[in-house]
Image (tube, helix red, strand yellow):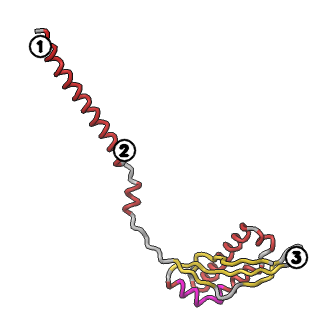
Amino acid sequence: MAEEEETAAAPAGKGKLFIIIGVVVVVVIAVAVFFLMGSGDTKEEEVVSQPVATAEPVVYIALSQAFVFNVNSKTKNRIARIKAQLMLRGAKNEELARSHMPLIESTMLISLSVATVEQLRTVNGRGELRDKITEDVKTALNKAIGEPVIERVLFTDFVMQ
């Protein structure tokens, strides 16, 4: 009889063990699903739900001639040669830039005429000059036609002697 009671108690203990293990596994799976599926972050959902704006393709216009100009220095004047391209977007802006090319080139030449040797010797100085020319051209086009038309002026060749 004592043997029968032990065998009867053993299956009941194993059943409780399986139930406990099952509950723990379910809880672990539930927690994992909660973290993997998102814990209430709506930032990702907002980004996905916003429509993506389609930008017009980038167009580059090479200026017909290189700019050759004198560069002032404290010790010795030099000559610089710069080739440039205009970066803009869309066929409309391309047409506007081509039709206003004399204004663009004139504005660039005026901006280049105030450059110094010390400024053009460094990469940062050339970058500042390029940014200044970009802003000057945008301002001139904005005054002439009411919109900046270009995004950037790019130097594609630079020589200073």
Per the rendered image, the range of residues in magenta is: 93-104
Frontmost residue, 59 versus 132: 59
Tell me whether the residue at label 1 lies in contact with that at label 3, contact meaning CB atoms closer than 8 angstroms: no
Q: In this view, does 152 lie above or below 6?
A: below
Q: Distance between the residues labelled 1 and 3?
A: 112 Å
- Give percent across and percent down for residue 8: 13, 17
What SS does tag 1 mark? helix
Q: Residue at x 58, y 90 (%)?
A: 99
- Give percent across and percent down for residue 106: 69, 86
**Label disc, if present, on residue 4 of the rendered structure:** 1
Q: Residue at x 13, y 11 (%)?
A: 3
What SS does tag 3 mark? loop
- Give percent across and percent down for residue 24: 29, 32
Circle 3 Cα neighbour tier, 10 Å, few/some/many (<14 / 14–19 / ≥20): few
Q: In this view, does 80 lie to the left or right of 26?
A: right
Q: Is residue 146 magenta?
A: no
> Circle 3 is placed at which residue position?
76
**Label disc, if present, on residue 35 of the rendered structure:** 2
Frontmost residue, 23 versus 151: 23
Frontmost residue, 157 versus 132: 157
Q: If the image is split into quadrants, where does the N terminus sit?
A: top left
Q: Is residue 94 magenta?
A: yes
Amino acid type at circle 1 is Glu
Q: Distance between the residues labelled 3 and 2?
A: 68 Å
Q: In this view, does 10 lie above or below 61?
A: above
Amino acid type at circle 3 is Lys
Q: Is residue 12 left or right of residue 51?
A: left
